[in-house]
Image (cartoon, rainbow, N blue to C red):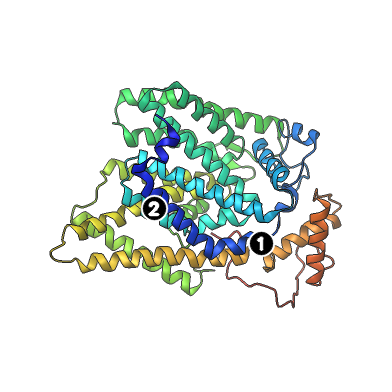
Amino acid sequence: MNFFNTIFSKKKNVILYSTVIFTFVWYIIFGFNLSYEPYVWDDLHFFREYTNDELKNIWIGNWDSDGIETPSYRPFAVLYYHLLYLIFEENTFLLRNFIIFEAFILVLISNKLLTYLNFNKSTILLFTLLIIFSKIYLTLISWFTISVLIFVYIISVSSILFFLISIKSRSNLYYFLSIILTTVAVLTREELYIMPVILFFLFFYLYRINLKNFYSCSIKVFPFLFIVLIHMYLRKEFIPEAEHLQITGYTIKYGENFLNFGGLIKAFKSSFLPMGYLSSKYSSLAQSIFAWVWIMVIIISTIIVFIKKKILFNFKKISILILLILICCLPHLTVARSFGIFLSSFFALALIAKLIDSLFSLNKDQSEKKNYLSIFLLTLFLLSGVFGGIYRSVEHAKSMSQFSLSIIKFDALFIYGYKNENINVSIPKKRYLQKVRHLEELEIYNFKWGDDLKIRSEKLIKSNYEPLSF
């Protein structure tokens, strides 16, 4: 089976063309403005040319030679930053557009996985529409540092595909490719520790649950688990100062903190919401309206399709999808990260897209007598999901702007704050001078973390949300 020919076969062209159109519309709304945003925050020291000694040290030590980031073992993340800087240097316009292209590839490969999981064409089109205009999509693109996750998700979804293809075709080549890609993913971000569990449950999404398959799947998945265990060992061996999972008595701790079930619940809820997490503390009125309409339509539509028996999933597949969403949220037990919910959103929005498609089917079956309730629900679905996602994405883009108060504070920390603490931060000279001029134009000449910045510039952009808000 030729993987790339399968993606671009004539049968699938409608999905490809639709993805291009949706991405083009997204680019008109967001892409032009994002393309002119410079390096900010962590970008300032991550994207640079690393020395040979630094590149050697990432295999035996902390990924951050400056010592200001969370200690971890992420050698391929540093190689990603290093390689992209060698290609694009200070040209952030081309770099941003490359990252947008990466996100486009991620959606295409995600669509291919859904095809392999037997989702029909209309469901995949609905999924594509929802994911491209969701808040998580723009989140991954709007911060250069986090774009490494797009790379990770591309190789992770590809690894899942190769694994499933290897099972069906009994191909050792695809199986070993899957193992290699998972190794790269785990060595880039430890959030991908969940890969063996995802593979295990997706196997049973496609195949029967019995003792023989359980044994066969366990043997196939074991090498992926072994990769995770090796990474955990290397992380503990080379970076003892990093936080690690600890079992003490009857409790499990991550570093000095207990596991955060609140973070897991927040990530799980957010995965179903293209317009972002619904919070009583910081959600604006507009976002709350979009979210509540979306939630109510999901509830009403679910009741209707089950009563009419038009849901095309069986109970096993629905259960496994919900379980996979929860599994993809497990990394948030340690640290809840708003930018780390793409995989859980992938499964959640695929499930929602299936529900929407069931409403379409319900309306088609009653062509002689139009089902106005279904039409009304479909309209609310698309309006609240797409426009809610666009609204929240606009707000997130504002929060990541070089002129937002949050980003100005982070930039000032890197330019002045760390220097005041006698910490040397590796920022390329040209970028450093540009950022100094930017801050001086805003009348910022010094900074210590916790200082209250009073900026009177008309360029200041206000957002209802923080950059790390769900």
Residue 130 is drawn in which quadrant?
bottom left
Q: How many marks?
A: 2
Could you say which is closer to the camera, residue 380 or residue 257?
A: 380
Which is closer to the viewer, label 1 or label 2? 1
Relative to 155, residue 26 above or below: below
Q: Can residue 412 be seen in this view?
A: yes
Q: Nearer the viewer, residue 149 or 208?
A: 149
**Residue at screen point 27% across, 57% down:** 302
> Secondary structure under badge 2?
helix
Q: Can residue 340 be seen in this view?
A: no
From the viewer's perspective, is 95 left or right of 217? Answer: right
Q: Which amino acid does label 1 sit on?
A: Tyr
Q: In this view, does 276 lie to the left or right of 187?
A: left
In the picture, measured across the screen, residue 377 lies left or right of residue 238, that is left
Mark 1 or mark 2, earlier in chain:
1
- Residue 426 lies, in percent from the top left, at 80, 48
Question: Please, what secondary structure does the residue beneath circle 1 have?
Answer: loop
The residue wearing badge 2 is 127
- x and y percent of residue 32 in the render? 59, 63
- Name the mark on residue 72: none
* Residue designated by label 1: 36
Percent coordinates x, y for residue 290 in the rendering: 42, 69
Q: Which amino acid does label 2 sit on?
A: Phe
Marks 1 and 2 sit apart, C-alpha to C-alpha, by 29 Å
Q: In what quadrant of the picture does the N terminus appear?
A: top left
User: Compared with residue 231, is residue 89 higher up or lower down, i.e. above or below?
Assistant: below
* In-front residue for pair 460/8: 8
Looking at the image, the residue that sits furthest to the left is 368
Tell me the crowding category of disc 1: few under 14, some 14 to 19, or many 20 or more residues within 10 angstroms, Cα based: some
Hey, which quadrant is residue 191 in on the image?
top right
